[in-house]
Image: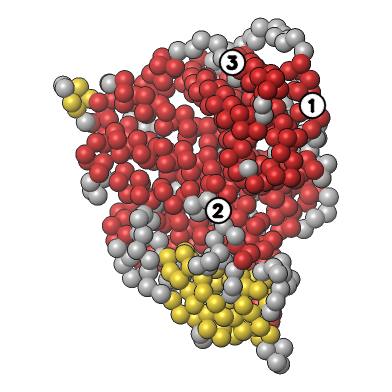
Amino acid sequence: MKPIKGGEFIIRDTEASEIFIPENWTEEQRMIAAMCEDFIKAEVQPHLDRIDKMEEGLMPSIVERAGELGLLGMSVPEDLGGMGMDFKTSLLATEYLGSGYSFSVAYGAHTGIGTLPILYYGNEAQRTKYIPKLSSGEWKAAYCLTEPSSGSDANSGKTKAALTEDGKHYVINGQKMWITNAGFANVLTVFAKIDDDSKLTAFIVDADSEGISLNPEEKKMGIKGSSTRQVFFNNVKVPVENMLSTRENGFKIALNILNIGRIKLGAGVVGGSKAAITDSIKYSNEREQFGRAISKYGAIRYKLAEQSIKTFVAESAVYRAAQNIDDAINGLIGEGMEKGEATLKGIELFAPECAIIKVAGSEALDYVVDEAVQIYGGMGFSAESSVERAYRDARINRIFEGTNEINRLLTVDMVLKRAMKGELDLMGPAMQVASELMSIPDFGDKPTGVLGNEKAYLKGFKKTILMVAGSAVQKLMQSLSKEQEVLMNIADLSIWTYLAESALLRVEQMIASKGEEACAPQIAMVKTYFYDTADKMNKAGKDALNSFAEGDELKMMLMGLKRFTKTEPFNPKEARQLIASKMIEANEYCF
């Protein structure tokens, strides 16, 4: 069977045995996770207040200790001082360091957008000079892309670079803002336009270069311990050999590094979610009202179950995509491609999934921390509680790495562009669904197996995407790109379907190895997620269709939508009680 392509999940069925699930980590990978967990407990949690007060030198010293343990070099080849781990193992480390509040932001910026542009786009001399010291933590990295007038539209930046008369340096002038790690970084990846170029070029700039100045630390809603500053470049001379990659390739570098950043953020927020759920469970077991622990009340159990469902589903998607990326990378290396190039290409192939995971993960974390504060009640509003910090720190994740709105639009745009290039056959299956609307419904055989209904629902979810997206493309044609509300609806249909399928395949694989009884809470999570998602699919599909279709055609599609999102009776209260009971008994997130 051919390897699955990015975005192809909409039109192709995947077998449970084809995906990686977190239950299958090796002993070595579990040891890495444990090392990351121990690091957070020993080096970060005891110092959270000091970190948030930005005590001089504290954050860089913690980053250095992470470097001493090898945590900064997960993705770095061994010959450059790293651990040379595969992509999904680097995501596992990111997940387990994701509960480190501001530290996890500093770590993510350093190891991701700070280090990877040089690792993947640098020439041999640049990699040899910078990567070992970034991997050890001796040098810290920052990434200077955003400007006051260019955020989502990154290529509109006004920072300029001009070649000196002797041809030995570029002189950079401009201003960057929201630069993570700027206060202590030694190495900056700076994006600027040379002369009147239409696209950005990237440069490696030593942070102590003459002409670089910083504004004071930004005062922020959350991640208060993360260094965030404006950086000014006033006639900063950069050696010509410090151009990263080629002229005008900076925009492509920025896009590809953002793809990596998105799925890494997805892994990190799963770690943050799990920590906040465990806090919620422990508090609900300790806090008594009306003579009993609040974990015994249905309203609290609903929240705990819902927190875990959203987290379990997001985690399933993260590692499914990670394995697909690893397989793509290995396939490209097998064809003779150099590893760095293969890594970038492999991740780029699954850019739609990276965007999906960024959106889903950040919104799951937002739900989890919001309900954690609610479970804590008044104590959750106190700065003395862990969930107050988690609540404030979580909010940035829907803005980081491209806002969730931009990522929703990108998800649809990337898939449609691939269809137009002939890389994905969307229109064939979409036309099949359209012809199915005209025929007498074939309800087929009754689903069998504990997740039989959900497998049938999944087919309906995919038909919903194809019907709505296919009709939108035909009706709106060139104006579709301006119909953001419709695109958002299609994106949500795609996100929910990818998550639903990922969780379903994970639990199918678990059942095959452990049996149904051992997987009862996970089965309940999948069933509840599908039950809730069917109604959301119906609403989003209806909203989209009502905005561009009319008459008999609209009636026919709405009837089809009703059929594609129909569910059998199901008791969600009982399912959530089962999920919550398991965690309450374990006194932690245990899935």
Query: For this rendering, which residue is in front, 66 or 580?
Result: 580
Can you tell which of label 1 and label 3 is closer to the viewer? 1
Residue lying furthest top: 446
The crowding category of the residue bearing disc 3, from other C-alpha atoms within 10 Å (few below 14, some 14 to 19, many at least 20), is some
Tell me: 124 left or right of 232: right
Residue drawn at x 71%, y 39% is 476
Q: Report the Cα–Cα distance between label 2 and label 1.
A: 33 Å
Query: For this rendering, which residue is in front, 524 or 457?
Result: 457
Q: How many marks?
A: 3
Q: Which amino acid type corresponds to the residue marked 1 in the rendered image? A: Met
Colouring mode (rainbow / by chain / secondary structure / one colour)? secondary structure
Residue lying furthest left: 291
The crowding category of the residue bearing disc 1, from other C-alpha atoms within 10 Å (few below 14, some 14 to 19, many at least 20), is some
Mark 1 or 3, nearer chain start = 1
Residue 169 position in % (x across, y down): 66, 86
Residue 235 position in % (x across, y down): 56, 86
User: Which residue position is annotated with label 1?
Assistant: 431
Q: Which amino acid type corresponds to the residue marked 3 in the rendered image? A: Lys
Q: Report the Cα–Cα distance between label 3 and label 2.
A: 34 Å
Q: Which mark is residue 566?
A: 3
Residue drawn at x 64%, y 17% is 559
Residue 16 position in % (x across, y down): 66, 26
Can you tell which of label 2 and label 1 is closer to the viewer? 1
Q: Is residue 61 visible?
A: no
User: Which residue position is annotated with label 2?
Assistant: 402
Tell me: 193 left or right of 72: right
**Secondary structure at numbered mark 3:** loop
Q: Is residue 307 visible?
A: yes
- The picture quadrant where one finds residue 241 is bottom right
